[in-house]
Amino acid sequence: MPSDSARRPGIALTDKQRIAWLRLIRSDNVGPSTFRDLINHFGSAEAALQALPELSRRGGASRSIRIASVDDAERELERARRFGARLVGIGEPDYPPALRQIDGAPPLLAIKGDASVAAAPSVGIVGSRNASISGAKFAAMLARDCGRAGYTITSGLARGIDTAAHRASLETGTIAVLAGGLDQPYPPENLPLLDEITGGRGLSVSEMPFGWEPRARDFPRRNRLIAGISLGVVVVEAAERSGSLITARLAGDFGRLVFAVPGSPLDPRCQGTNGLLKQGATVTTSASDVIEALAPLSQLDLLEDRVIDEPGGERSPDLMLPPDDSDRQRIASALGPTPVEIDDIIRHTALPAATVYLVLLELDLAGRLHRHVGGLVSLSMID
């Protein structure tokens, strides 16, 4: 189904910019937050790519940083095209609007399917892979009723609750967020469901490269996207230690609403959801609980938010000058294994903000900095 992106505002990347953006995000030690800082400092992805070797050297890298080549980027774009997918930038019309608002939003997303469903407000529905019959039926009821109320249903294509939510929202609109590349769906038995999603009123999305097989550590990254795309997340069934609780925690961190379906205290699959209720999640016994709570949020203009843009023009010479060694040492000494806010580093060192941000970029690209949710940073444990 064609996208209606022409009717939605956004900033389209040129082909040259898309290749440069893809090269930058696929280079070593460049995550979404680092990508944003590099663009803000250097003005464009092309300029940032040229600066990467020197920045990582000044940060104390033990080896040369790997930079994705033009050929690498062109091959990935061609692989996406052959698969029927494409890569959209964070400022482009088909990028999910609510996702733009979170810290560390992916600068590029691979998408396949009907991109118009991403423009509607979304409800995330997640839960146990080993779902009970009643849990799966309730998830389907929620998805169906929220879909009829105008919400796109977002979930992770997993067995159990995710599968029930996707199936119930095939006609109204659903987004499947993958932990691996779009061509590496998991679990394999849900491939027919994914084909139904992308072949109808649905969309699959991933921030990972094509060919990337999902690993255990990739699923929390996927959960972050589910929480970011959605205005609220409903947890139907979840054990005490489960990925669904990670999604709920991230939703809370992003300022989203968290809903939980109460269950039997004797059922291990409900211990996590009952725990969320004790922590203040909204009790959910029908779709109206979700729809009524989200109604004020769904009216907000999610397009008026921060995006990554390349302003062009020359950077100020003062911004381009490297920090001296004494400033670099002062900032590194202020850091430790405990996460701290960047504003606290600026106050503690009494150095200009531009200097602090540049040194943090150097440490980051050298693999010596760890970024945390909420914009906190710490020295990597290996440092």
Image (cartoon, rainbow, N blue to C red):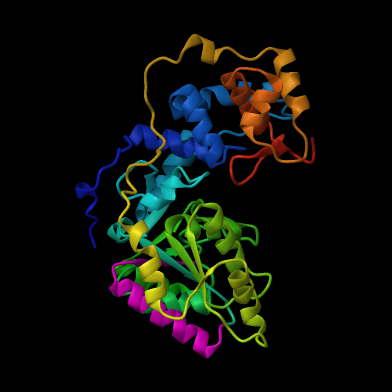
Quadrant of the snapshot with the N terminus: bottom left
Within the image, what quadrant is residue 274 found in? bottom right
Relative to 80, is 4 on the left or the right?
A: left
Within the image, what quadrant is residue 358 found in? top right
Indicate yes or no whether the magenta region holds residue 200: no
* Residue 26 shows in the view: no
- Against 328, is 192 above or below? below
Total marks drawn?
Answer: 0
Relative to 122, is 55 on the left or the right?
A: right
**Which residue is outermost to the left?**
7
- Secondary structure mostly taken by the magenta-highlighted segment of the chain: helix
**Which residue is outermost to the top?**
317
Which residue: 22% across, 54% down? 4
Which residue: 69% across, 35% down? 367
> Measured from the top left, where is residue 47 in percent x and y?
47, 23
**In-front residue for pair 30/292:** 292
Q: Specify the segment rendered in magenta.
A: 131-156
> Measured from the top left, where is residue 76 in percent x and y?
45, 46
- Against 323, is 83 above or below? below
**In-front residue for pair 76/357:** 357
> Measured from the top left, where is residue 110 in percent x and y?
42, 52
**In-front residue for pair 117/198:** 117
Which residue: 56% across, 35% down? 34
Relative to 301, is 34 on the left or the right?
A: right
**In-front residue for pair 100/273:** 273
Relative to 341, is 299 on the left or the right?
A: left
- Against 167, is 41 above or below? above
Indicate yes or no whether the magenta region holds residue 136: yes
- Against 201, is 70 above or below? above
* Residue 145 shows in the view: yes
Quadrant of the snapshot with the C terminus: top right
> Measured from the top left, where is residue 331 in percent x and y?
71, 23
